[in-house]
């Protein structure tokens, strides 16, 4: 049983990467539906913005306990994070807070 990433087979590493990508894309989709920026999701869930970015792009793993924190902010059941996203992430970032809130300058 491998305990370190370098001890895993290439097949297992690819399978984990695909799972991270599916969950990350779904989190991004739900976040955008809620009108949240990455920073807002980070602040409300107790994670860093860089961590949210890494999760959404499938580059970082997250402790499963944190999935409940993310789901609570997104207003969904944690099971919803594991269903495939309707759309793949696009490259243009969303730079707003919650929808409906006007930014004053």
Image: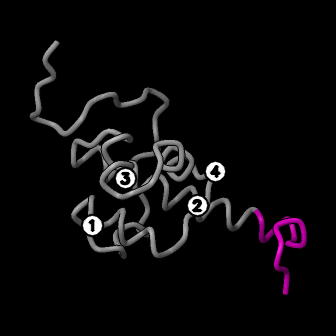
Determine the CA span between mark 2 and mark 3. 16 Å
Which stretch appears magenta? 1-13
Cβ–Cβ below 8 Å for labels 4 and 2? yes
Q: Is residue 81 above or below residue 36?
A: below
Whichever of callouts 1 and 4 sits on the residue coming sooner in the sequence is 4
Determine the CA span between mark 3 and mark 1. 20 Å
Q: Is residue 3 above or below residue 22?
A: below
Horizontal relation, residue 36 to residue 16: left or right = left
Whichever of callouts 3 and 1 sits on the residue coming sooner in the sequence is 1
Frontmost of labels 4 and 3 is 4
Whichever of callouts 4 and 2 sits on the residue coming sooner in the sequence is 2
User: Which residue has dot 1 on it?
Assistant: 72
Quarter of image, res 72: bottom left
Which is more toward the observer, 6 or 50? Answer: 50
Q: Quarter of the image containing the C terminus?
A: top left
Q: Going 90% across and 72% down the picture, which residue do you hit?
A: 7
Q: Element under label 1?
A: helix
User: Which residue has dot 3 on it?
Assistant: 86
Q: Mark number for residue 20?
A: 2
Whichever of callouts 2 and 3 sits on the residue coming sooner in the sequence is 2
Determine the CA span between mark 4 and mark 3. 20 Å
Tell me if residue 9 is in the magenta stretch. Answer: yes
């Amino acid at each position: 049983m491998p305990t370190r990433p370098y001890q895993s087979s290439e097949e297992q590493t690819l399978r984990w990467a695909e799972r991270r990508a599916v969950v990350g894309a779904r989190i991004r989709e739900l976040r955008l539906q809620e009108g949240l920026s990455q920073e807002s999701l980070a602040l409300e869930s107790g994670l860093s913005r860089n961590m949210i970015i890494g999760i959404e792009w499938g580059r970082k793993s997250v402790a499963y306990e944190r999935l409940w924190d993310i789901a609570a902010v997104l207003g969904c059941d944690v099971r919803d994070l594991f269903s495939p996203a309707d759309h793949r992430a696009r490259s243009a970032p969303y730079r707003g807070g919650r929808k409906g809130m006007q930014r004053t300058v």
